[in-house]
Amino acid sequence: MPRLIADVLPAGALAGGDQPRIPGDGVLLRPWRAGDHAAVVAGYTDPDIQRWHARGMDDAEARDWITGWGARWRAETGAGWAVVSAEAEGTVLGQISLRRVHLDEARAEVSYWVLHAARGHAVAPRALTALAGWGFTGLGLHRIEVAHSTANPASCRVAERAGFALEGTKRAEVLHADGWHDMHLHARLDTD
C-alpha cells in the first residue's frame, strides 16, 4: 500500500556515508572495532547489564554483534557506537546505539549501557547528549526515544540529564527474567 506522506529522510541518509565519530563532553562515540569484542563480552556478562538488556554473550557472539552493526548501518535500520574516553579511545566505557531507525518518520530509539568500572562518571548522559546532537543536526532526525524499565531509576536519570522528557509509561511492555516490566518512554524532539 503506498504511503500518502513522503518519507521525511531519504534512503541513503545513513548508508550514503561512513559512520561518523561523534565527539561529546569528555567522551567519543566511535564505530565498533573487531578488537573491542572483550568489552562487549564484559558488558553482556555483567549481571546489572543482563538484568536490563535480558541477554548474555560469549566471545564469538560478541564478534558477530560488532560485525552486525556495519550491516545495520548499510541497511539503515540501526547504528551502534563504542563509547570511549575522548583522551583514551582504545578503552571502551560502554555502548550506545540507535537500535531502531525509521528514516521514513525521522525517528529512532536509543539503547545504552556503561561498563561497571566507568559507572558514576556521567558517561551515559554525556554519550546520549552527544548522540542526540548528531542525530538531530547530522542525520536530521525529528524524534529520538529512550525506553527503560520503570524499575531502573538510573536509566531514568540518564534520560532526564540528557534532556529527554518523560512522556509516559507503557504497561507490561518488555519481558525480563523476573517477568513483564512497565517501561518509561522518554523523548527529545529536534525542536527541544
Image (cartoon, rainbow, N blue to C red):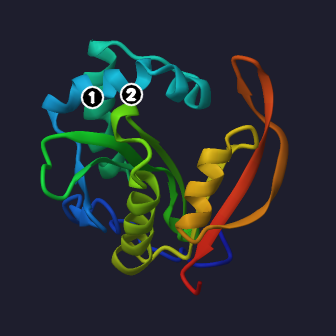
How far is disc 1 from disc 2 in space, using C-alphas?
6 Å
Where is residue 3 drawn, in percent x and y? 65, 69
Answer left or right for 116 relative to 49. left
Could you say which is closer to the camera, residue 187 or residue 90? 90
For residue 1, say whether it is visible: no
Q: Residue at x 61, y 46 (%)?
A: 154
Q: Nearer the viewer, residue 96 or 126?
A: 126
Image quadrant occupied by the N terminus: bottom right
Q: Residues within 10 Å of mark 1 (few under 14, many from 20)?
A: some
- Quarter of the C terminus within the rendering: bottom right
Tell me residue 129's x, y (percent): 44, 67
Q: Mark 1 = which residue?
A: 39
Q: Residue at x 52, y 67 (%)?
A: 162
Label 1 amino acid? Ala
The answer to whether mark 1 and mark 2 are in CB contact below 8 A is yes
Which residue type does callout 2 highlight? Answer: Gly
Q: Position of residue 60 (x, y in %)?
A: 27, 14
Rendered position, 70 above or below 180 = below
State the residue at coordinates (64%, 66%). Answer: 187
User: Image point 32% across, 50% down: which residue?
Assistant: 73
Q: Nearer the viewer, residue 76 or 25?
A: 25
Q: Judging from the image, what secondary structure is the residue with disc 1 in?
A: helix
As drawn, the residue found furthest toward the bottom would be 191
Residue 91 placement, left or right of 39: left
The residue most toward the right is 171
Q: Is residue 37 left or right of residue 135?
A: left
In the picture, the disc for residue 43 is 2
Q: Is residue 120 visible?
A: yes
